[in-house]
Amino acid sequence: MTTTGDLLRRFVAMVRGLPENTRDLLHTILLGVASALSAVAFLLLTNYVFKVTYLAFMERSLTFFMTASFCVIMGTSLAVGLLLSKIEPDAAGSGIPQLKAAYWKEVGYVHWRPVLVKFIAGVLSLGGGASLGREGPTVYIGGGLSSVISGFLGYPKRLRRGTMVIGASAGLAAAFNTPLAAITFVLEEIISDINSRIIGRVVLTSVLGAFVVYAIVGRQPAFTLPAIDTVSWKVYVLYPLVALIASLAGVVFQRATLSLRDRLKGQASVPPWFLPCCGGFITWVIGSACFIATGKVGIFGLGYHDLSEALSHGFIWWVAGVLLAGKLLAFIVSYGFGGCGGIFSPSLFIGGMSGFFLSGIAGFWLDLSPSDHIAAAAVGMTACLGSIIRAPLTSLLIVFEMTHQFALVPGLMIAIIISKIVTRRSGDLNFYDAVLVHDGHELIRIRPPVDIRAWQNLPVSAIANHRPVIVESLEKDALREVVEKHPYNGFPVVMDGKLTGLVTRARIEEALRSDGTVTLEDAVTCHFDQPVRDVADKFIESPAGVMVVMDRVTGRVAGIITLHDLLRAQASMMD
């Protein structure tokens, strides 16, 4: 009897037998469609949970809304906290920093478990009211799913980079129905190279992602951004101020969120699984207060329901101001306390409300049309998102593709210019890179050079292992413990605080078998500030393929670098 497993194995064997170009094309289409479908499923489930909770609760009495919303946000926050702390901590946050780390440090390999946990926790978190976005998790799920499927089809880990990226682009394209923005985001943020050789596959899967979401959900899967009439010249006077305020809101979010995350990492009074509940409670307080004041639920979840209403029918200026302040605070605590969600949706909401707030106030002196208010909101969206992710093309295109209104383009370009000026004065890193640095990653390992000369001029510290396993005793028991606990092939030997040589795994195992003394190799040394080019030449002198990195000041062993480290780093750059 033929089983499903047999059919799958036959299918994989048939695909492997096809010509390489045909196989790559089919593989790309499969990953694009699968990633887009995962994005649509995530979208529909998140929207459904929010619809049957908050949107239904707001139709009832205030007491019912307060009680029911508290139960929902605390219950889902507890479930998310348990999932992230007990099952898969890597599924926390946006997902895009983790995807970048997987792209560069794990050559595109992503395990299936964080992908599954990210999907479940994301639906619970966003549908349950956490003030975060679904685009980051969608990108992670799409990229991770593509990596998992590629592994099932027999692709080795070293070939997963391209497959992970094309899945991410399909996911983002499906999240907003914005294929151009998906292409530029992948090239600007993940690959950091607009001349990447996989750009053709990225374009194809982005188009597929847009087709899939258009066929299932419709033209505007996120929020409704209506067509506008001619924008008056008066609103151009307002654009720089809107862009400035929205950009500053983005800077406030980044600094406050990173500061909150760092403080919570060092505390021991609250268990990690309970931290999302703390964020959920604060979000509930803020969201409930804003609901009482305005009758709007935009503080909870994505906020797209209220954003669509504002864009279609307009908001009173003070309502937009209340939602702007409330969303910014809820955004900070939801992410800072370890929630599962992204930053696109809240950034667009905050930027949009900045535009409505300022244009509403300006309306007391300027005769602004509804189209002018929408244009100001679009400028705020681009500026706020641009100040956080610092990907100017993506920030412009993601708003433009939702409207296809060329009348907005000059204003969006002004927003990008202002956001660039603000962010240059606020720090060197965008939010994703700052998260990676705060989590202990070395940025040079996340964004290596893209040309051979720049790579050769890198300092050794960029690719060395800063935590070497040092042998301090040549006794048999100590040597046996070293080889049993550590899989490495070479170990520096330090006696009385001085480097005396290098011992290889083969020499240790030989000595243990023969009950003889272990033979040491001469240690070839270098320093952290030397360029990779010099170290590569020195490897010829090292028969063990290991170099010891010395601290110039103390004279102590500070790290090691192996031939494997050198080749792996070079392969990352060449790929």
Image (cartoon, rainbow, N blue to C red):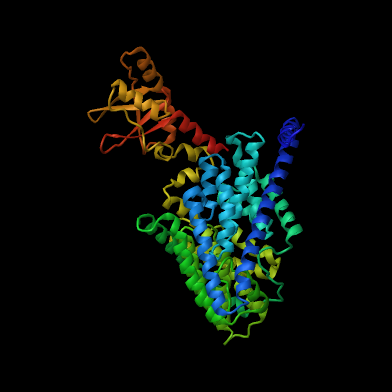
Q: Is residue 544 above or below residue 35?
A: above
Left or right of residue 425: residue 124 = right
Depth order, front residue of 139/192: 139
Find residue 158 and report its horizontal and vertical position in percent. 58, 35
Outermost residue on the left side: it is 496
- The residue shown at (22%, 28%) is 496
Q: Is residue 99 above or below residue 215?
A: above
Find residue 369 and report its horizontal and vertical position in percent. 66, 82
- The residue shown at (47%, 36%) is 456
Residue 126 visible in the current orientation: yes
Depth order, front residue of 92/320: 92
Find residue 122 and report its horizontal and vertical position in percent. 57, 57
Outermost residue on the bottom side: it is 364
Residue 430 visible in the current orientation: no
Q: Quadrant of the N terminus?
A: top right
Find residue 253 and report its horizontal and vertical position in percent. 47, 65
Left or right of residue 354: residue 477 = left
Depth order, front residue of 454/41: 41
